[in-house]
Image (cartoon, helix red, strand yellow):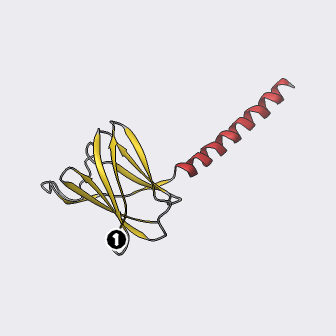
Amino acid sequence: MNKTILKVAFAAACLLGLQGITFSSLLMAEEQIPLILIEGDTSTPIPKRTPELTPLVEINDAGTQLTFTSTAAITFSVVIEDEDGNTVLTDVFALQQNTQTNLSIASLPTGDYTLYVIIGDNTYEGEFSK
């Protein structure tokens, strides 16, 4: 009888573990937004994303937030323009080494946007749809 209880408990734990993995995978699903250097130090080939200097930018599947992750301490500005070139959102971030921050874009209407990440004299451009 004890073996049966252990087998049932093990099966239940495995099932719950698989559901947890599937559920957390859905929550963590994000799409990376490639950034291309458009202005500044163009001595290196384009596209340029130096992980130490340029944050990784991801948009969540719900299209409600951008996540910026950096492996180095950096300060940068973010400008988002709509399809017509109108600035719809701006912000400034200071990230410590190996940290991330989020920018809510939930208030933006459905459409295509251009993201500018400005670090010092360098401007990086990326595009995303919501």
Q: Does residue 120 appear to the left or right of 60 in the view shown?
A: left
Q: Residue at x 58, y 46 (%)?
A: 24
Tell which residue pokes out farthest to the left in this image. 43
Q: Does residue 17 appear to the left or right of 6 in the view shown?
A: left
Q: Does residue 43 appear to the left or right of 50 in the view shown?
A: left
Tell which residue pokes out farthest to the right in this image. 1
**Residue 15 in picture, x, y percent from top left:** 70, 41
Badge 1 local density, few (<14 within 10 Å), some, or many (20+)?
few
Tell which residue pokes out farthest to the bottom in this image. 84
**Residue 43 in picture, x, y percent from top left:** 12, 54
Q: Amino acid at mark 1?
A: Asn
Q: Residue at x 32, y 42 (%)?
A: 94
Up the image or down, 15 lies above or below 113; here it is above
Task: Count how many numbered circles sit on residues in the image.
Answer: 1
Residue behind mark 1: 86
Q: Secondary structure at mark 1?
A: loop
Q: Residue at x 34, y 46 (%)?
A: 93
In this orientation, which residue lies closer to the viewer: 102 or 126? 102
Quadrant in which the N terminus is drawn: top right
Q: Residue at x 83, y 30 (%)?
A: 4
**Residue 76 in picture, x, y percent from top left:** 29, 49
In this orientation, which residue lies closer to the viewer: 76 or 29? 76
Q: Quadrant of residue 98?
A: top left
